[in-house]
Image (tube, grey):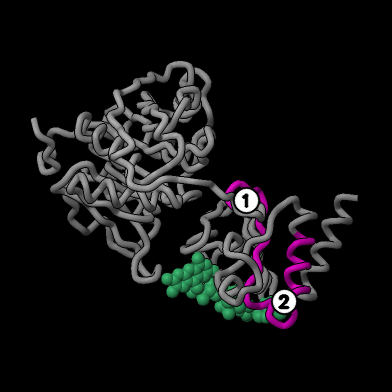
Amino acid sequence: MAFDSRDTGAFKGVWVFCEQREGKLMSTDFELISEGRKLADDLGVELCGVLLGHNVEGLAKELGGYGADKVYVCDHELLETYTTDGYAKVICDLVEEKKPEIFLIGATNIGRDLGPRCAARLHTGLTADCTHLDVDVTKYKEFLKTTSTIDVDNTVFEENTNLKMTRPAFGGHLMATIICPRFRPQMSTVRPGVMKKAPFDQAKADAVVVEKPAVALTKEDIHVEVLEVKKAAKKLVDLIGADVVVSVGRGISKDVEKGIALAEELAEVLGGVVGASRAVVDAGWISADHQVGQTGKTVHPKIYVALGISGAIQHKAGMQDSECIIAVNKNETAPIFEVASYGITGDLFKVTPMLIESIKALKA
Ligand code: FAD
């Protein structure tokens, strides 16, 4: 029967697009597989990873270890390097054949390119940059109770298993929950670092089912040719994987060089990396890969230090789930103190050297 995205009852299962680059899976894959596992359990359905590439079958086990029941491995030499045409065709063919109900994609550069293309071709909706996903109404209500001012107990909620896709809207000033009730699959992109990775389970890795669908792809399907892949010359900072992030804000403006040097030294003694607010990135004081927040990276390290950062809602969106937040700000009413575990009111140029010395003394 022809594929019809409006035939909602014909769709079943949760899928995650698992991105690999040069035969290496991305951390977003594990985060989305872990999140997809919860959704699949709530729905009582299978969780499948979708892996495209050439000679990448060996990666399937790792995805199983984070919760995938099955991995569709689409292997073809034309899939060795990412192209929008090639990947979109293979994925859409597979979706049309297997009909998943939910399809999650990491909001990486590739995912942001691929997701909308597939959604348009499949005639369905896509919610970009989600920060929270639910299918279960009770769990969704619990989420609202802790994150919104809605009187949940006195509000009528429709009982259904539509995917409730929550994302920041209006510049991060409110959270919008979006549903796609009339079309399938329900598609969503999720930013790297937002969902938490489950612990790896070797038994699950060994039990994963690998299915290799036939791939119908020719050179004519692909309208671009990748001649060369050039990697960024500079090594980018790994904010998402860091246990400690020391971020600087516009508060360093009095002496930018010194401010960044102090953050680097504090990060070094704590074994962490340097992050920044958007104000610092926009001013050109540090490169964009350091940015934390709604339009930067979402981090949840063990320790997050905010030096001279006011705590705008868009910054907090990227760091408020950190285990321990230490804020240094000369303004005692700065909103960053609302989410801080420890707040120090003072000049960062005086406080940071004291912090560095104290930590060094503790380590000695
Ligand atoms: P400011 O708000 O100017 O705060 C500087 C702070 O430093 C002040 O609190 C001040 O009291 C303190 N200070 C000054 N001197 C000292 C000193 N010597 N010692 C100690 N404290 C001092 N922002 C992000 O960070 N990340 C994002 O991803 C992001 N995305 C955005 C997306 C949208 C759509 C929009 C509209 C905005 C976004 N922003 C983002 C911008 C955000 O709204 C704020 O403008 C930004 O976070 C402010 O950065 P800041 O805290 O460094 O600067």
The answer to whether 16 is drawn above or below residue 72 in the figure is below
Residue 186 percent across, percent down from the top left: 24, 45
Please say whether residue 168 is one of the residues in the magenta stretch: no
Q: Amino acid at mark 1?
A: Asp
The answer as to whether callout 1 falls within 8 Å of ligand 1 is no
Q: Secondary structure at mark 2?
A: helix
Q: Which residue is mark 1?
A: 238
Left or right, 354 with respect to 207, comes to right
**Whether residue 332 is visible:** no
- Residue furthest to the bottom in view is 254
Q: Nearer the viewer, residue 337 or 299?
A: 299
Q: Earlier in the sequence, mark 2 or mark 1?
A: 1
Q: Which mark is residue 256?
A: 2
Q: How busy is the neighbourhood of tag 2: few (under 14 within 10 Å), some, or many (20 plus)?
A: some
The answer to whether 309 is drawn above or below residue 192 in the figure is below
Identify the image quadrant of residue 93: top left
